[in-house]
Amino acid sequence: MTEYGWTWLSDYNWGWAPFHYGRWDYDNFYGWYWVPDNVWGPAWVIWRRAPGYYGWAPMGPGMNIGMNYGSYYNNYGNRWIFINDRYFGRNNINHYYANPNDYNMLLSKSSVINNTYVDNSRQITYVSGPTSSDVRGVTGRRVSSYAIQENNVPGQSLSNGQLRIYRPQVTKSNNIEQRSAPSVITNRQDVRRPSEINSPSQPVNRNTNNNTRQEQQQDAINRQDAINRQNAVNQQNAIDKQNAVDRQNTVNQQNAVDKQNVTDQQAAVKRQNAVDQQNAVNRQNAVNRQNAVNRKNAADQQDAVNQQKTVNRQNATDRQNAVRRQNDVNQQNIRNNEKVLQQQNVKKTNNERRDKSSNTVNTSRNAGAEESSKNSPVRK
């Protein structure tokens, strides 16, 4: 299991080419043969689910996902491989194939598995086969998915959860270019049938009438089948081309719509970014204005505090000056009072002295008068 779905890992060192590029078909005379192509695929097979079995068969030349491949090989059980679903996903898967005698019965009871994977990088859709959950449900084992990695040399290897596979981009050659061809080409009459290949020691009578008639009839049927398939391929190719054109037109229209949507989204994003930026600028301006107001208020508050401190200092100085002046006045008053008191004391002393002196004089006078009166005659 890979991201593309179930991928065929061949045991042949050249298996990277015929099992991943081109298609396989079956001829009743020659057996299986390969038709090369330039488109890589994980496994160009179609899938069916029968009770208890998974089955697959190669997609014939010209078949693609857009075709109704559900009925392809419906009448050819030998084109299919069926395996018991309990053993699906094992490396030795070939040990658990159902009995080929039961293929027609299993085919009649089977239904188409339509799971697909779209590879956008290569612009192609693959049939992916049963889902991992379906396989896990019937096997009871975890289904590991391997990542495909490009290998730069032919071959494939599986290790460490990776499938390294050689899948170069094969380009179609035009009519001008020289087409490649094998160095040795085997004549058709020299090609052995499968019975001869499987039992080379047993001689095969190729000239019996029955065999010749049957082979001729089968060849005619095969040629008609080939013509019918080619016509179907041509018709399908025309349908595919038109579908491809329609899909491309749809893709182009969707791309145009997507581009317009992207442009509109980008324009909306730009407008929103412009609004967001303007809002951010407005918010920053508001913050700056508020910060300026806060700084102005803080400065005003500081100035008021400084002015109050200055007033307080001036008031303290004025109070101190007033106290000093009052003290000076008080001291001056005390000095003045003392001076007045001194003057009063001096004046009192002087007054006392004058009074004492006056009293002494008066006393002297009075004594003299008395003495005089005693000595002078009394006038009667």
Image (cartoon, rainbow, N blue to C red):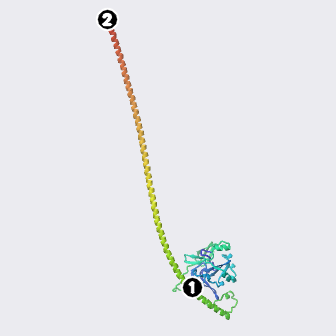
* Residue mark closest to the camera, 2 vs 1: 1
Viewer-proximal residue, 128 or 187? 128
**Residue type beneath disc 1:** Val
Q: Quadrant of residue 12?
A: bottom right
SS of the residue at dot 1?
helix
Residue 158, percent from left and from top: 63, 75
Residue 137 visible here: yes
The quarter in which the N terminus is drawn is bottom right
Residue 264 lies, with reference to residue 360, above or below; the image says below
Q: Nearer the viewer, residue 202 or 103?
A: 103
Q: Residue furthest left?
A: 379
Residue located 62% across and 90% down the image: 221
Please name the residue that numbered disc 2 is placed on: 375
Q: Is residue 115 left or right of residue 285?
A: right
* Three-letter amino acid code at the position of disc 2: Asn
Q: x and y percent of residue 332 in the render?
A: 38, 30
Percent from the top left, x then y, of residue 299?
43, 49
Q: Secondary structure at mark 2?
A: helix
Return the residue at label 1. 233
Q: Residue visible at 34% across and 11% down?
A: 366
Q: Position of residue 27 (x, y in %)?
A: 63, 87
